């Protein structure tokens, strides 16, 4: 039938997105589109829209969007390859696999069988006489039998090769267990030994409910307390969330996920009816984990231990929530407690109250900084700005960034321009002769005006592809502040113009969910009225003016630095560059 790209296009042509979406959502016609309740977040008024002509969906509530492949990937938590295979079967298209792909597929299936056999062995051992110590431990931690069964807990008995010997008669050699992360090779060809020994076992499942890895906890004071099987073809720790398969339906219903730190915290939450809880498999939450969570949740509450390690982990986790643009709040636990201990001591209602009182990112970090520094002193205010400034400098959304600066100024009684100046210093300053760093917040009105201009231009370029070619010399992706805007602009301005009838090709150039969401919104929203090509040219001129103003500001700062340093040679060069930038800025102002 052709190459991979042509086959993907053929799948799009043959598969009706309405039929696919209708298996999950009740849709009603609304003009050229269809609307229904979003399957990705809880809502009472339909904001989920499908455009069958263009083959895209978009939710105006949670901003999920994409084509039919994205919908299958979201609802089934599948990779693109898995979604493509599923849709190809629906379309009656046979996908040819290369020998390498067939080998990888066969290897994956073999590893799944090995891990499934190991999970059954561990479960049986928990019920056997050898598992008495693990059963006593679970009783002491008040993990009831129903929860043990639901999460398929097990036990790895002491001894060096119990699992290896148990699986060998079933056709699984020690080398296969090693590939699955279940066995470790001894040096100098001395055979293998079990990776997990004398530990309570927590199977880690994928979103299809299949075990892919294991976590093990010691039952005494041994170290390490928790040990995961190593990463394999089936399992990447930084891309997996414990209990997500069990929690995802409740997350979809409530729109919210509760993120805890460890296995026992997650078990305690589910046992006490907090069924939208997942665990991060340790203290380091990754961007991939948050993006995975974002497929099902429109917001999250981070509930880590109240000790110093937990507070540090929570602070690190907040940064990746901001990168993923998933709204998050932080629940502050009393004393030195953790979610498991709190639930056992005070019950689910106390836990829910703490979650309801959780603080937004900015408020939480400001509260922490205010504990460390005295906001009544000048030095204390500087310390707070330096600490909170690191958060503000990492924020990608200019409107949110501007609001954080305003709130910080109100809290400290400090002028916003003074805070912005300090943000430039702690952000490392501006590159000499370069543009203003994104980390420096503009006033909210200016930031908003620029963001509106960027969005308007992108919308026009999506619905008026003929304008893409004419604007390539005037507009460049680096002129856009927002990373998602920049990515979509690069896709629109690269290569041949995307036909309005083939937005799937444009979708293939995008990688981030934020950029895919923007494209979907622009395809489905009402197109701008009037002369779109002229409107696009006007937006491009305004955007260029914003860019030139940034260059003027950066050069003025550089001139001031050169004057203070007494660098006459550099001062002359910068003054000439500044004069030229002023001339261009004046010309752009006259053009608009």
Image (cartoon, rainbow, N blue to C red):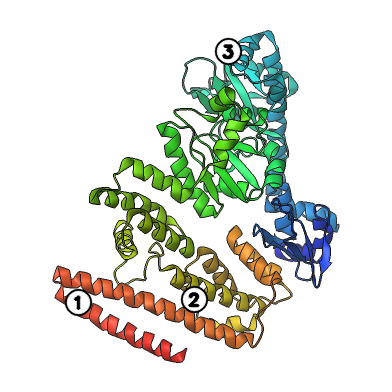
Foreground residue, 260 or 362? 362
Judging by the rendered image, the residue that carries numbered circle 1 is: 571
Q: Residues within 10 Å of mark 2 (few under 14, many from 20)?
A: some
Residue 294 visible? The answer is: yes
Judging by the rendered image, the residue that carries numbered circle 2 is: 476
Q: What distance separates the C-alpha of mark 2 from that of mark 3?
A: 63 Å
Q: Position of residue 194 (x, y in %)?
A: 58, 21
Of circles 1 and 3, the one toward us is 1
Q: Residues within 10 Å of mark 3 (few under 14, many from 20)?
A: few
Q: How many marks?
A: 3
Q: Residues within 10 Å of mark 1 (few under 14, many from 20)?
A: some
Please say if 447 is above or below 37: below
Q: Earlier in the sequence, mark 1 or mark 3?
A: 3
Residue that lies at the very extreme toward the bottom in this rendered image: 590
Q: Earlier in the sequence, mark 1 or mark 2?
A: 2
Please say if 136 is above or below 273: above
Which quarter of the figure is the N terminus placed in? bottom right
- Secondary element under disc 3, as helix, strand or loop, is loop
- Secondary element under disc 2, as helix, strand or loop, is loop
What numbered label is drawn on residue 159?
3
Which residue lies at the image location 34% right of the left edge and 63% below the top edge? 416
Please say if 200 is above or below 562: above
Q: What distance separates the C-alpha of mark 1 from that of mark 2?
A: 29 Å
């Amino acid at each position: 039938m052709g190459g991979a790209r042509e086959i993907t296009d053929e799948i799009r042509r043959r598969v009706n997105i309405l039929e696919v979406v209708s298996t999950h959502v009740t849709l009603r016609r609304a003009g050229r589109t269809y609307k229904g309740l979003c399957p990705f977040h809880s809502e009472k008024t339909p904001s989920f829209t499908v455009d069958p002509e263009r083959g895209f969906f978009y939710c105006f509530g949670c901003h999920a969007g994409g084509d039919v492949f994205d919908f299958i990937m979201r609802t089934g938590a599948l990779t693109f390859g898995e979604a493509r295979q599923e849709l190809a079967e629906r379309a009656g298209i046979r996908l040819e696999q290369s020998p390498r792909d067939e080998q990888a597929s066969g290897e994956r299936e073999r590893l799944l069988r090995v891990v499934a056999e190991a999970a059954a062995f561990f479960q049986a051992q928990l019920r056997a006489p050898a598992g008495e110590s693990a059963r006593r431990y679970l009783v002491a931690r008040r993990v009831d039998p129903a929860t043990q069964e639901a999460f398929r807990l097990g036990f790895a008995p002491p001894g060096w090769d119990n699992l290896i010997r148990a699986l060998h008669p079933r056709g699984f050699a020690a080398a296969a267990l090693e590939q699955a992360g279940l066995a470790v090779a001894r040096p100098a060809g001395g055979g293998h030994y079990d990776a997990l020994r004398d530990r309570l076992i927590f199977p880690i499942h994928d979103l299809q409910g299949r075990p892919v890895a294991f976590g093990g906890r010691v039952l005494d004071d041994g170290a390490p307390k928790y040990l995961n099987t190593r990463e394999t073809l089936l399992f990447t720790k930084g891309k997996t969330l414990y209990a997500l398969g069990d929690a995802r339906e409740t997350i979809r219903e409530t729109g919210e996920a509760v993120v805890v730190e460890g296995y026992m915290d997650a078990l305690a939450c589910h046992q006490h009816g907090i069924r939208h809880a997942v665990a991060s498999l340790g203290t380091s939450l990754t961007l991939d984990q948050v993006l995975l969570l974002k497929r099902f949740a429109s917001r999250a509450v981070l509930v880590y231990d109240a000790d110093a390690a937990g507070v540090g982990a929570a602070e690190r986790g907040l940064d990746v929530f901001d990168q993923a643009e998933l709204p998050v709040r932080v629940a502050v636990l009393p004393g030195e407690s953790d979610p498991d201990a709190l639930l056992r001591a005070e019950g689910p209602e106390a836990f829910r109250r703490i979650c309801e009182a959780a603080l937004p990112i900015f408020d939480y970090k400001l509260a922490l900084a205010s504990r460390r520094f005295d906001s009544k002193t000048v030095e204390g205010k500087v310390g707070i700005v330096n600490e909170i400034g690191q958060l503000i400098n990492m924020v990608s959304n200019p409107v949110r960034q501007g609001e954080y600066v305003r709130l910080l100024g109100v809290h400290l009684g400090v002028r916003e321009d003074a805070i912005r100046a300090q943000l430039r210093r702690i952000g490392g300053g501006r590159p000499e002769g370069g543009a203003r760093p994104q980390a420096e917040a503009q006033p909210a009105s200016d930031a908003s005006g620029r963001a509106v201009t960027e969005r308007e231009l992108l919308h026009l370029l999506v619905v008026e592809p003929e304008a893409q070619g004419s604007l390539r010399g005037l507009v460049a992706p680096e002129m856009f502040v927002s990373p998602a805007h920049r990515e979509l602009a690069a896709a629109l301005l690269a290569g041949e113009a995307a036909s309005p009838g083939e937005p799937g090709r444009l979708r293939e150039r995008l990688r981030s969910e934020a950029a895919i969401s923007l494209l979907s919104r622009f395809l489905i929203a009402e197109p701008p009225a009037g002369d779109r090509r002229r409107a696009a040219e006007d937006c491009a001129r305004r955007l260029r003016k914003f860019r030139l103003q940034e260059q003027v500001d950066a050069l003025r700062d550089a001139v001031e630095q050169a004057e203070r340093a007494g660098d006459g040679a550099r001062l002359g060069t910068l003054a000439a560059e500044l004069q030229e930038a002023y001339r261009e800025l004046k010309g752009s102002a006259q053009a608009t």
